[in-house]
Image (tube, helix red, strand yellow):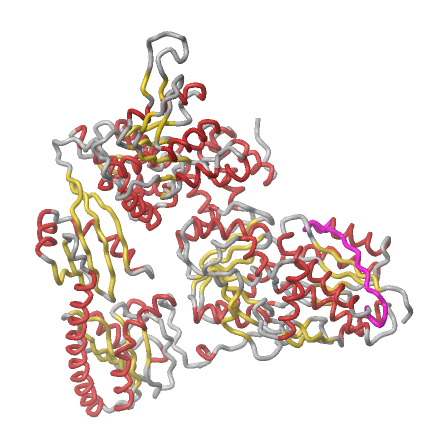
Amino acid sequence: MGNESIRIGLLFSLTGPTAVTETGQYQAASLAINEINEKGGINGRPVISFFGDIVSDPLITVERARKLIKEDKVDILVGTYTSACRKALLPVLEDEDILLIYPTLYEGSEENRWVFYTGALPNQQLQFFVPWIITQLGRTFYLISSDYIFPRETNKHIKRLVSEYHGEIIGESYHPLGNQYFEAALHEIERIEPDIIFSTLVGDSVVAFYKQYYDSGFTHPICSPITAETEIHALGPNYHLNLYSSFPYFSSVQTKKNEAFVKHFQAVYHSNVISSVMENAYNSIYLLDDALHHTDSLSTDSLRKALARSSFEAPQGDIRFDENNHHLWQFSRIGKVNKSGGFDIVWQSDIPIEPAPFLLNTHPNPLFKNPNTIQPDMMFLKQGQLHLEQEKWSEHFYFFEDFAQKFPYDFLLINQDGYLIEKFSNYTNIDFPIGSKWKLEDIGENGFGRAIKREACSIVTGCHHQHPLLKNLTTIGIPIKIFHETAGVLGIITNDGGEEELGQAIKHIGLYADIFSKLITERKKAMLLEHIVNGTNLNQLEGLIILYRNSIVFANNLAEHFVNSQPLLIDALSSDLAELSNRSAAEKHLRKRIGDEAYEIRMKRWEDFYFIFVKEGHKETENSQPATKSSFQHIIGADPSFLEAVHIAETAAKTDANVLIIGESGTGKELFANAIHNESLRKNQPFIAINCGAIPKELIHSELFGYTEGAFTGSKKGGKKGLFEEANGGTVFLDEIGEMPLDLQVTLLRVLQEREITRIGDHKPIPVDVRIIAATNKNLRDEIAYNGSFRSDLYYRLNVFQIELPPLRKRPNDIPELAQYFLMQLNRKNHTHKAFTTDTIHIFKQYEWPGNIREMENIIERCYYLSGFNHLIGPEFLDPYLRSRNEIIQQVGNIESEKTEEYPEKKQLLVLLENNGFNVSKVSRILGISRTTVYKKLRLYGISLKR
């Protein structure tokens, strides 16, 4: 080889929708080039890189590549990210006879003489990832993807694997590159409730979707073979709580080579955010380095042969090209995002995985390998719920294991809902999958399901079974009773046809099971007593009701009084109890109004028991008017973030500290301010509310602090107290504090510090004792940092207690109760008994409520009066735009269910425009967004307005 340089062309997007990922690839490749040059180059020849920004566009990729080849005379190309960009280059590579090293995971099904692939193939990512997900996280999947080659092809592999491992795809959607709006997909996820969200979104769409997903309150795990450290970093610290990925490399890999790589990258770029595709780019340069140590020529043929035999001790471990298909043998790993934004590795292969670009080689999971596995066409328990059930029974497993040692049968533990929780032996060599459901309606005749239905010992013999693998077996179910109710079933399976011997065994087993039931009942009584003592607040007078399933097993005297005076109390809590049983948290707080009574309620779940602690709130009778002074008893809701705001407000009310309330217009900021004042020691003193945005700027100073006689006209008349003086001893509520002029902010800060005011035209300070509660719908930190329109010292003075009120759209479960409350107020006022239909409540829950609670109150009052003498308020009495919005959501749902190729949001816009005569103003009002945003969406989707 001569002394000339080695010229490498780098093709990455530093702008465009996938720049968030490709920028790191460019940096990693550049790092490798610099490291090689610092060591003297390749065989003494320096490596020079030439760069083309391809902006995630296939046509620009071709243009930039041709420039690098013809003008910069590069010897080889490295880069591109999207499959569309790579495929656009294939004719160019052949025409110009030049190689491309492609450093990105991709969909497979390609082998090109001019391309070497250093990213992962589907079989290296998915063949372990999908079965791991199904066994560890859940069985039902929703696929959300960017609409281009890689996601669509990858999803074919996903579907095959999910089917093979007995999972189910229950929904999917595709979105254009760079798409930022996922409302329709989130509605679909909420409707179908999958166990897993499987994401093949890329670039900017990843950040947008994950933020909207977590902001919407979803907690289902997200799994992705694309989302890596770079995307997690772009999300920020609050949006990566439950996410899993599969790659050959994570920055947390424990190898000396990786330690050096991460350390050098951090020193150069001041970042430790390194992803798998970045390592791919880094490896690509070093694989080229290894190849050039084995050839004296830079011709394409020589490079092709040398690269095919190259290898490298990479940060992930030893990798090498497969000579037959130009793909890498590399590792497979699964990681879970941790709090610092990195990945904890939860599984990894011991050796590199063979690349299989044309065939998805699946790695059989031991849980599914038995050809005699019972796989009934039925339901499976979600993985999280299965773990909870196993934990609940785990302390009694020894009892069932003892059975398994004494008798030559298979023993199963099945809960009262028919799900198989654990198995304890395998004499019959039939594999009964953990989590499968065995009720009669799910699998047909069997002893376990019959025992659940009859609540008595049941035996079903061979030919009476419906499942073919049970035809030669006998299945027996013996109920396990706790508090005289069936809590589960001990299942027995045997090949033995000897009825006499089997009958004797059943008697012995039944006797043991009866003893076990009595022992566990007594133990639960003792544990129940302990929970009652620990869960009771001795400092508060509370009613306590204990439910076992749906039966009251205990109620103290106060609780009996509540139940007798309010027979609908337990029924009114049924949906909240159901929600508590379906979520991982074991406690729930809520405020509920039933009839004329308001209640503060907290509920705790312990196994199958529910503890309901009840305190009576403010009472309103048919003939009485609601109290004019708001208190926390008037505040209704069960949403966790809302209750957290109530808790902070109640704490603030016990102090004299300043409070800052943040929330959108209509969320109830003044209601909270009133409640804080009315439950404070200042409750008997004035409460003065001031809207800082409604008073003219030239008058606001005099309104707040007053003025002396003649301060404006020279007259001796007309002096006036300011609102701060009027509120002396009480509370001043400064609404829309963000609108206060800067010069007045200086004065207010001095008032807070000195606790005195000075009237306009006077020099004598007047002492005032006021508590400040401020409110705003602005982000004051942004106003301080970016606009300079709010003083930081005033912000910190006001922000002793910060209360953030969630918008109504983020409290969907509170919407029905709030609607009923406002309707009850109108019924009381007008001596009527109107009610909403189910369809009306459904529309309320679907609506976004841009005006929040204030808008809801106005809409309900309007439909109440429009309904006239009708007892039921149906959708026909609602505002037209609410009905239109609901129709659009239904139409979009129908469009998505047909799985058309067009984008759901585009469909939504087209339906809206058609229904509203292509009136953009109407569409913007229905969507709750500005006209400018509507026009941006129209341009994005290429929609032309009909005139």
The answer to whether residue 883 is seen in the rendering is no
Locate residue 175, reporting x and y percent.
Answer: 56, 50
Q: Is residue 482 left or right of residue 15?
A: left
For this rendering, which residue is in front, 357 or 528? 528
Question: 734 or 228, which lies in front?
Answer: 734
The residue furthest top is 715
Q: Give the range drawn in magenta.
A: 41-59
Q: Is residue 286 above or below residue 227?
A: below
Q: Is residue 685 above or below residue 23?
A: above
Q: How many marks?
A: 0
Residue 471, quarter of the rendered image: bottom left
Quarter of the figure with the N terminus: bottom right
Quarter where residue 874 is shown: top left
Please name the residue shown 38% across and 45% down the image: 810
Where 710 falls versus 789 (above or below)? above
- Outermost residue, right direction? 2
Residue 55 within the magenta-colored segment of the rendering: yes
Taking the spot 44% from the left edge, 78% from the top edge, the residue there is 367
Residue 99, by quadrant, is: bottom right
Up the image or down, 256 lies above or below 600; here it is below
Left or right of 162 on screen, residue 708: left
Q: Let me know if residue 709 appears in the view.
A: yes
